[in-house]
Image (spheres, grey):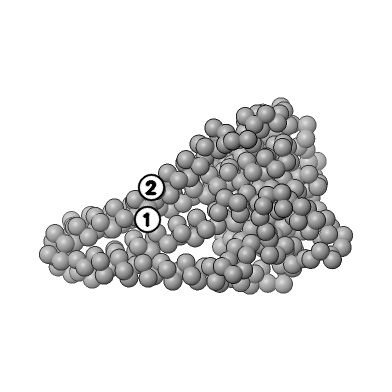
Amino acid sequence: MGETEAIRTIKGKIYLTILISVTVTFFTAFGITALVSYFTGYFNWLLVLIIASIYAAIQIVLQLLLGPSAIESHFGNKLNFISGGSGGANKKVWNMVEKMSKEGNVKFAKIGILETSELNAFVYWGLGYGNAIVFTKGIIEKLDDEELSGVCGHEIGHVKHGDMKAMIFLSTLPIFLHTFYSYSQSQGKYKKDTVIWLLIFIIFLGALIASQYLSLYLSRLREYHADSNATDMKESPVPIAAALAKITYGNIGKGEAMLATRKEVNMLCIVDPHSVARQTNNIAETVNSISEIADHISDPDIDQGELEEEMKKEKKRGGEMERTHPLTVNRITFVVDYAKEIGVI
């Protein structure tokens, strides 16, 4: 089956966002170069570009070589890797990942279990290391087998789509902005003109803010794309939709457990562990708006009072612009619409 309109749209937005991010970075660098050159008569842009490129290359190499060990060091002895000889629930997880990774044509060098009651999962990757997938103990205990396989399909999607590599590349763009701006500050002549100095600062700051919001937008697009892979692999939106609802609203009240996945790794997770308790709608409103799968998503353990309180807080905070992940209700709506498009519901 060829790509659907929904997937073409998402991929188009991903490519366009990356292009805009690169364009903003280099047009800002050009603008700073032009302004400083005009008022000082000289700006060695080639030297600055080479220096920035070296800094960016160093960051990429460090992330590729040290990223996996940094993540594993961050979690310490709470992160344990399993093998085919594992027993109990770990054996179930191993078999599921082995089966689905073959179906998805990806390989995982490691399969990990994170000892926390939080409901989450994530993948990471490094040069010479390969891909690793991690499930929290909480998600294994809370989700049924179908829902857990939906989560696995989502994480496999991130690997198939090269999301980790794209984010590593984009993380280097601010280096170019900082390098050009810092070099401009060493050219003292124009600083006597407060207006010009302020203009350069505004250009730099505006580009930095724009880059941050573009990065967050790209992160949200990546989540939709990975959700579509889960729907494709399961030939149904129910496993991933039910999993997302349970993960999001099941994490409410797990403040201490959330410390296990701090901000340094929240972009890796299937849901942002620092915003799951601040979603726009409670679980009942979410599933009732999607009658096709409403009967498949239920969780009597979730405290409705807490949900109502968090719902009020979320409405005051606004939408998705500052989030790494879309609101859960939007993700569920997307997979249902996508499932209709590919004809599985």
Q: Amino acid at mark 2?
A: Ile
Give the vertical position of 174 relative to 301 (above or below). Answer: below
Instruction: Report the residue at 45% width, 45% height from top.
Output: 15
Nearer to us in this view, 1 or 336:
1
Q: Amino acid at mark 1?
A: Leu
Residue with the mark numbered 1: 208
Instruction: Report the residue at 68% width, 65% height from top.
Output: 109
Give the vertical position of 39 relative to 17 (above or below). Answer: below
* Neighbours of disc 2 within 10 Å: few (<14), some (14-19), many (20+): some
Horizontal side, residue 327 vs residue 19: left or right: right
How many numbered markers are drawn? 2
* Neighbours of disc 1 within 10 Å: few (<14), some (14-19), many (20+): some
Instruction: Report the residue at 40% width, 59% height from top.
Output: 173
Horizontal side, residue 286 vs residue 164: left or right: right
Q: Nearer the viewer, mark 2 or mark 1?
A: 2
Horizontal side, residue 17 vs residue 252: left or right: left
